[in-house]
Image (cartoon, rainbow, N blue to C red):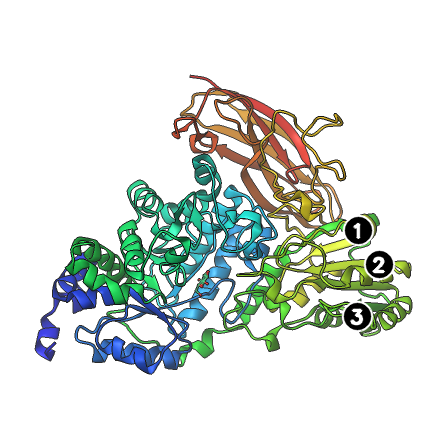
Amino acid sequence: MEQSERERAIYLDPEQPIDKRVEDLLGRMTLEEKVGQMCQYSGFSEEREVLVKEGRVGSFLNVLGAEDTNKVQRMAVEHSRLGIPLIFGLDVIHGYSTIFPIPLGLASCWDPDTVRKGASIAAAEAASEGIHWTFAPMVDIARDPRWGRIAEGAGEDPYLGSAMARALVEGFQGQDLADPDTIVACPKHYVAYGGAEGGRDYNTVDISEGVLREIYLPPFKAAIVDARAGTIMSAFNDLSGVPASANRYILTFILRKEWGFDGFVVSDWNAIRELLSHGIAATPTEAAKEAVNAGVDMDMEGDVYQKNLVRLVREGEVSEGTIDEAVRRILRIKFMLGLFDRPYVDPERASQVIQSRENLEAALELARRSIVLLKNEEDLLPLKKEIESIAVIGPLADDRDAPLGSWSCQGNPKDVVTVLDGVKSRVSPETTVRYAKGCEIEGASTEGFENAVRIAKESDVAIVVVGETREMSGEAASRSSLDLPGVQEELVKAIYETGVPLVEVLLNGRPLSISWSAEHVPAILEAWFPGIQGGYALADVIFGNYNPGGKLPVTFPRTVGQVPIYYNHKNTGRPPSSDRWSSKYLDIPSTPLFPFGHGLGYTEFEYSNLQINPKRIKPSGKAKISVEVENTGDCRGDEVVQLYLRDVVASVTRPVKELKGFERITLAPGEKKTIVFTLTPEQLSFINRDLKRVVEPGIFEVMVGKSSEDIQLAGSFEVKE
Ligand code: BGC
């Protein structure tokens, strides 16, 4: 385009409204350029330089650093005919350079405000190096801990999952996408990816409409409708016969018509081409046609749109209107991000933003908040700082890699504070800290046991840090066993045998079946992969500088044989009981090892005065539930007050309980607080036999407690026409 024409173009005028700019630009584009906007590639190369200059690439992922993003952006903006900027995407999942706990850990905070803050920090760091778009949050509900990607989400519950989805999207996107510190979010993987059969990644999902709408869709709805995420990623999986990336029902009917989504859909990596393997397309051309007509606007790395869409339009198999609509959506987000007006980043900026003191403090706070005290017999924890000697043992005690977790983005093992570092930093100068690795995370060698046992015997207390490698969770990292890998459990047993008081610290990406430890080890801390400040956070908890208040966002099974096991299950016709002919296993109890919502602390909380108002409401009415919580112990601490509900009799079977409210509070000793929850019709509703969302008359049981099992107060109200 000529310089003079460019100056006159509406789409280049920042004063014009976005929709006008989009339409003006669309009107100038060739079909090839339009299809170009719908293509995304991973990493830059010479071959791609040609495509960029021809205006045939809309986006890159995995182009890193201010220098490179600016360089590639310049090719698009200054060397392509229309100068349409690229949108750079990246998996900024739990921090960019300042790495926070993995998302399952963030969910354990039960604290949307702090999580929102973390996401905004991740956004600012990423944006400072030219990233505009994160493939996050992952909001897939996961009821199967064999599935490695459980680490990337908020666990098993749609209510908690929705709260986390909102917080993360709001944190990434801020108030205004044009703000240089914000990036656009991309909730994924739409939808029901977490339902993979057998917990095997990428596996088939076949679920009912009720389960789809009540379990898997709510966090997406929260991200899209409440928090207004600008993009969404279509999943790899088959969904009840129609793969998600070719599923018009979810991508167009639910997403666009029901929810009014006006952003764009990007496919997961190569997911369009994989329609061939799914067996619903015979050729890449057919795959492209299926996906675009279903509502996938951008092809991630598949090269299927690039090679087929122009021809499909010319042959009348795909309408140009469909292409225009996809391009319109993509361009709108680019305009909203301000890319046309400020396509480059200031290369100086990153050094001011990345790993600033404030960001590291936020990482420490998130790590502390995410830690779950699973067990604490006879108040072994907190340890006294003046203790004479401590043995820090285990293959994860001084590991700088695992705490980063999967998708560690620009995180660097060098920045990781290990548990050993943390302990050393928090004890008094007189304390002797001894360290032994004991064994590897995997493998059969017990050679290191002797030394570990020796230092344990020489010490007043032993902290054993065990768990998983970073590669054992995340994508393509399903496990058929939930046991501690290798000989780690034997190591724990060997240290236990010494009789030294023992604290077990877990660093892992999924619930583990630590039945032996749960029975024998007096104190157990679940820290997940806690990010770069994790070692300090753990030491703060161990020595009582911080009173742990995290709660499990997912059920811990006794053994993998119980999976799937989740708290919001149905009752069955024969609920588990001592009766031989009830729903149970012969060889183990049907209860979990640690239930959803479980987590201890160093103080006590008493619940009283449950009030339900009114006791009778109309289906369109609201009920207020209030409860008083008092810190009756002797130190300041956090409690997560949890509200559960049961619809006792309905036209379809309902879960035995469902989380419908929670609040994390901090109370000083003797302090008391009234917590108020408001139940809305939406929260009382479910999908009935006609697949409609309804509130049915009848009794609702109200349960308030410290976990899904530890219910402190209960009552009920009635819904009546
Ligand atoms: C994953 C996505 C990720 C994408 C881009 C895929 O393999 O499933 O979660 O966003 O790669 O890295």
The spot of residue 387 in percent (x, y) is: 85, 65
Q: Is there any visible trace of residue 35 in the rendered image?
A: yes
Between 169 and 297, the one lying in front of the other is: 297
* Residue type at numbered disc 3: Ser
Identify residue for label 1: 516
Say what secondary structure mark 2 lies in.
Answer: helix
Residue linked to disc 3 = 445
Quadrant hosting residue 621: top left
**Between 122 and 241, the one nearer to me in the picture:** 241
Q: Quadrant of ligand 1?
A: bottom left
- The answer to whether the residue labelled 2 contacts the one labelled 1, judged by CB atoms less than 8 Å apart, is yes
| Percent position of residue 96, x then y | 49, 69
**Do labels 3 and 1 touch, CB within 8 Å?**
no
Tell me if 182 is positioned left or right of 508 in this view: left
Q: Nearer the viewer, mark 3 or mark 1?
A: 3
**Numbered disc 3: secondary structure:** loop
Q: Quadrant of residue 431?
A: bottom right
Looking at the rendered structure, which numbered label has been put on residue 493?
Answer: 2
